[in-house]
Image (tube, rainbow, N blue to C red):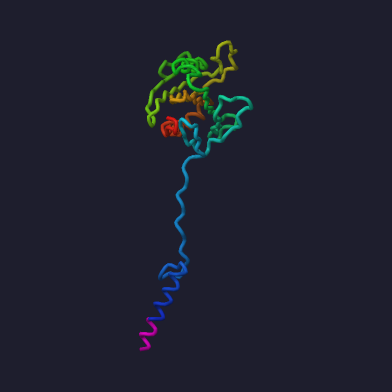
Amino acid sequence: MTRIIGALLFLAILGLGAAAGEEPGTGTQSKPAAPPAEKGGAKTDFEWFRWTPPAEWKPVPIPHGNNSRKEQLSLPAPPPAAAADAGELIVHFFGKDQGGGVEANLERWKGQFEKAPDAKEEDFAQTSKQKVDGLDVTILEVRGAYTGSGMPGAPAGPKKPDWMLLAAIVETAGGNFYIKTVGPRATLEHWKKAWYQTILGIKSGKGA
């Protein structure tokens, strides 16, 4: 009888422990599973498409009155480069049938760079076309001396040797989105894989 009573008391204690959230046999408080870590930074919804850039790319305030700029990000330079060597990414949207055609903008962006005299054309600029979640995306890479020129009548800026451009034009039913990223080549080469992952990870929006 004593053994039976002792066994019943032991089971009752186990039941109390389980009710209190203790793990049987340990006497320790059980902990809820930690939520999975979020990948990437803040998601941006442009209505016609959305994306999630890396968390390391920091938002930059858009100049007042510049309505065509929808997002501006700074891509930090890898150590030990100085902060001034950060890259700049700007998303432009002008509206339906505005902003110029795809090929015209590709040529304009290429015109903002000077090819090194000994560089081959394929090493200077490369273009590719992708289908991303049903959207046509044209990608341009350029390497050379950046002058910032290319707009009709705009003076050429000071040459910035060994710079790079990663650009994409996303065609949507609401109009083209122009994604231009420029900066020192070392910085953009550092972020190139993440840049492509961001572009190829675009999801068509509710208006697409």
> Where residue 107 sits: x, y (%)?
47, 15
Extreme residue in the front direction: 207
Quarter that holds the C terminus: top left
Extreme residue in the top direction: 153
Q: Is residue 153 left or right of residue 196?
A: right
- Is 173 colored magenta in this rendering? no
- Is 5 colored magenta in this rendering? yes
Q: In this view of the protein, which residue sits in the foreground, 194 or 49?
A: 49
Q: Which residue shows up at 40% across the image and 71% down it?
A: 25
Q: Quadrant of residue 206?
A: top left
Q: Which residue shows up at 46% across the image and 15% down it?
A: 104
Quarter that holds the N terminus: bottom left
Q: In this view of the protein, which residue sits in the foreground, 15 or 196?
A: 15
Extreme residue in the right direction: 64
Number of marks:
0
> Where residue 130 sits: x, y (%)?
38, 26
Task: Examine the rendered structure and indicate whether residue 172 appears above or below residue 56.
Answer: above
> Where residue 38 sits: x, y (%)?
47, 45
Q: In this view of the protein, which residue sits in the foreground, 42 or 186?
A: 42
Q: Is residue 133 left or right of residue 143?
A: left
Provide the major secondary structure of the magenta segment. Answer: helix
Extreme residue in the bottom direction: 1
> Where residue 108 sits: x, y (%)?
50, 15
Q: Which residue shows up at 59% across the image and 32% down it?
A: 60
Task: Examine the rendered structure and indicate whether residue 161 appears above or below residue 206.
Answer: above
Q: In this view of the protein, which residue sits in the foreground, 115 or 70?
A: 70
Q: Which residue shows up at 41% across the image and 32% down it?
A: 200
Residue segment shown in magenta? 1-7
Q: Quadrant of residue 120?
A: top left
